[in-house]
Image (tube, grey):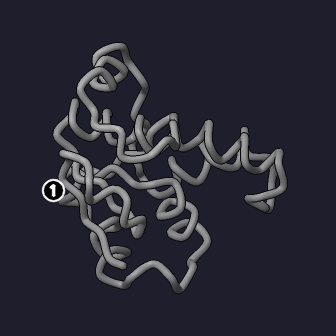
Amino acid sequence: MRFLLDTHIFLWFISGDARLPADWRDSIRDAENAVYLSVVSVWETIVKHRLGKFPLPHPPEYYLPAQRARHQIVSLPLEEASVCQLATLPSVHRDPFDRMLVCQAIEHGLTIITVDPVFRAYPAPILSRT
């Protein structure tokens, strides 16, 4: 499988948060799976960290890339083809970070791992729970 982690899933994974289902944790750790973290999630985390919404143990510009690399999660850059997916994406909600993750999942054939039920309304493969 090829997974794209929603921002909160990545943060739960690296912090050992019990809200992350054990089978998802196992799937992220499974070397047979290709697991990606979008630069959009790094951007979102830094923005929200500066707003006081995402406390982190170290400065995000160092901590996030180090944790991603430590867990052998591949960095997914944002390129023009993914951004162009916005032109056909339904207006399910207005969160620009989530919308871009959906665009990247569509463009790269990735399944998004998330607990956010809004993602299910998009035309992308979603691994989700409520």
Q: Where 120 falls versus 101 (above or below)? A: below
**In this rendering, position of residue 63 left or right of residue 84:** right
Residue of label 1: 1
| Image quarter of residue 119 | bottom left
Nearest to the observer: residue 58 or residue 118: 118
Picture coordinates of residue 89 (x, y %)? 28, 33
Residue at 53% x, 43% y: name it.
41
The residue most toward the top is 80
| Quadrant containing the C terminus in the rendered view | bottom left
Q: Where 17 falls versus 44 (above or below)? A: below
**In this rendering, position of residue 126 left or right of residue 75:** left
> Could you tell me which secondary element the residue under label 1 belongs to?
loop
- Looking at numbered disc 1 in the image, what kind of residue is underneath it? Met
Residue at 27% x, 59% y: name it.
120
Picture coordinates of residue 45 (x, y %)? 65, 47
Q: Where 110 falls versus 17 (above or below)? A: above
Q: Classify 10 Å Cα crowding around label 1: few (below 14), some (14-19), many (20 and above).
A: few
Picture coordinates of residue 71 (x, y %)? 47, 58
**In this rendering, position of residue 88 left or right of residue 4:** left
